Image: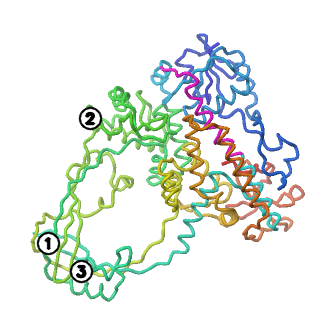
Amino acid sequence: MRLFLCEKPSQAKDIARVLGANTRGEGCLTGNGICVTWCIGHLLETAPPHAYDPRYKAWALDHLPIIPDVWKVEVKAKTASQFKTVKKLVAQASELVIATDADREGELIAREIMDFCGYHGLVQRLWLSALNPQSVRKAMAELRPGESTVGLYHAALARSRADWLIGMNLSRLFTLMARRDGHDQVLTVGRVQTPTLNLVVIRERAITSFVKKPFWEVEVNLLADGHSFVGKWLPPAECLDADGRCINQPMAQHVSTQLASGQARVVELVIERKTERPVLPFDLAALQEQCDRQFGMAVDETLNIAQSLYETHKATHYPRTECPYLPESMLEEVPTVLEALGKSDASLQPILASLNRQQISAAWSDKHLDGPHHGIIPTTEPVDITKMSEKELKVYDLIRRRYLAQFLPDHEYDRTRVKLATGSQHIGATGKQIAVIGWKALFKPEVDTELKDAESVTQPLPQLREDQICTITGAGLKSLMTTPPRPYTEGSLLKAMRNIAEQVDDPRLKATLKATTGIGTQATRASIIKGLLERGYLEKKRRALSPTTAAFALIDAIPELVKNPGMTAIWEQASDEIEAGRMSLEKFLAGQHQWLERLIQQCSTATLALQQTPPTPCPDCGAPMRRRTGKNGAFFSCSSYPACKGSLSIETGKKRKNKPTDKSHNTDGNR
């Protein structure tokens, strides 16, 4: 039997429909000698510490580090019935086609089942970038040999096992150290979670410690050939601070009075024609950042919508991509994609009529394809946009406009810099005049924040020439203050995680990290940020993220090696080496083991710099409350539970109507 192993039921239905496997069975679809089954995500999970030794149920320093000799996985209880079906089908299969998501995690989902069930037959890989019928048929004609994607599995295992080792060991280590020093709180530590939290703590401290400093600007109103424009006084060097701001108020005040009237002569005039090529299609991070800025969407919400556009609506290609470029072979699909867009939405017809369909933009570039996936673009078949929610349509519209931009002219503008002299003072002005709107006609200027450069919001200047005399019609002194760094939003934090080299001061480490893709992956970054919010380490006020008291306590308590984002990014690079076959999984894990052993040895006798926050009293019995996470999210629970079942809402601080009956989640870090 030929068995197709998919990741989700919806994915299995799409593939089975194309293959003619339309007979419903128990946890599968069959027909034409083919069986298609699914996993519902991970059917197996890494076993907890006590699966290796029952004594690990209790947390103790002398148990650490917990390092399995032979790694174990367990069947997830919630999906045990589907695993039973899959195991039976795998045993009957003479050929198995891995049809899970085309990424490391998808490879892990399939191959951990194959290993657990002892499958040793023929393996092929179905590599899907879209789930519409035409894309499925094309992928079926290009099945890959199973051995070609084994590196993805090993890289995913490396990440999964490193997460387990660090989360299980370090959460226990620092929690036990805190308890030894009299602090009653669980310190959740994760391989990526903790360095990410550190970024927010560092930013928050930069904001709170920021000292505002005054500076001054003089704006000068000018008139040339009947056209007005605004310039700024250019202070001499002795009036400026290190950042080029005028800090000499008396001088600025004097100049503003001096420049209230008179004339100024153009002494320098530079006009440059600037060209901006069409913006590339989205990768996942760019899409999440844009939706955060433009719509205020949380990054996990954008990911879910992008996944829905891919899986449910078959409207776009696979979203969990780190590459915005497209393979050159996809140029042949351009007419079909554009036709499908027109059939899907008649309002696009004027735009479609203006396109140069023969234009090949920089987006199509095989040499820039640095991973298994390409940019997120529309599929080749019409979709019913009326079935999309309002938010889905917004995200879909962003994706399709980025694609359409590839067939419009470059955006061109003239950037003018002018310097004027009046007496001993100089005035500068900058202007921008659009020459060709080009692809930017697809985007509203007020929301086009990602695409703007520093000059794009400047004024249009009148036609000027050197030695021209302009009339000064007035001047005004502006008293300004320096501003602190902005708080992270989910989108800007995700960008910081991705471009981690920008957050590192060490020049040697920064140079090494230039080639890395950051900390976390496209598939995990959103869940890491969401987890920090759910665990009570981050709070969200409107769009701004801020660390809680627990976050400061955790970051202050643990050593630099654990929270340093640069070191974490170096570990992330090792996954790429494993995928490429340049490093073995065993060598990587051996390095993790040695690092853990040294860290635990160094820290186990230390004292944590942990501040104890006053415990919240239980409204029923007065005992201290503890923060817990249950199936409905985080809440405060009485430390005397189950004798007392008092609980408080974290959001309101008021008693919860429903007593907590669910057990709190495992507090060991997992990422």
Question: In the rendering, at what x and y percent does residue 235 appear?
Answer: 28, 79
409 relative to 630, above or below: above
Q: Is residue 317 left or right of residue 594?
A: left
Q: Nearer the viewer, residue 531 or 330?
A: 330
- The answer for how far apart the CA atoms under marks 1 and 3 are is 18 Å
Packing grade of label 2 (10 A; few <14, some 14-19, many >=20) is: few
Amino acid on which the number 2 mark rests in the picture:
Gln
Q: Which image quadrant for residue 577? A: top right
The circle on residue 475 is: 3
Question: In the rendering, at what x and y percent does residue 294 appear?
Answer: 43, 53
Amino acid on which the number 1 mark rests in the picture:
Val
579 relative to 596, above or below: above
Magenta region, residue range: 142-164
The tag earlier along the polypeptide, 3 or 2, is 2
Look at the numbered disc 3 and give the secondary structure of its residue: strand
578 relative to 118, above or below: below
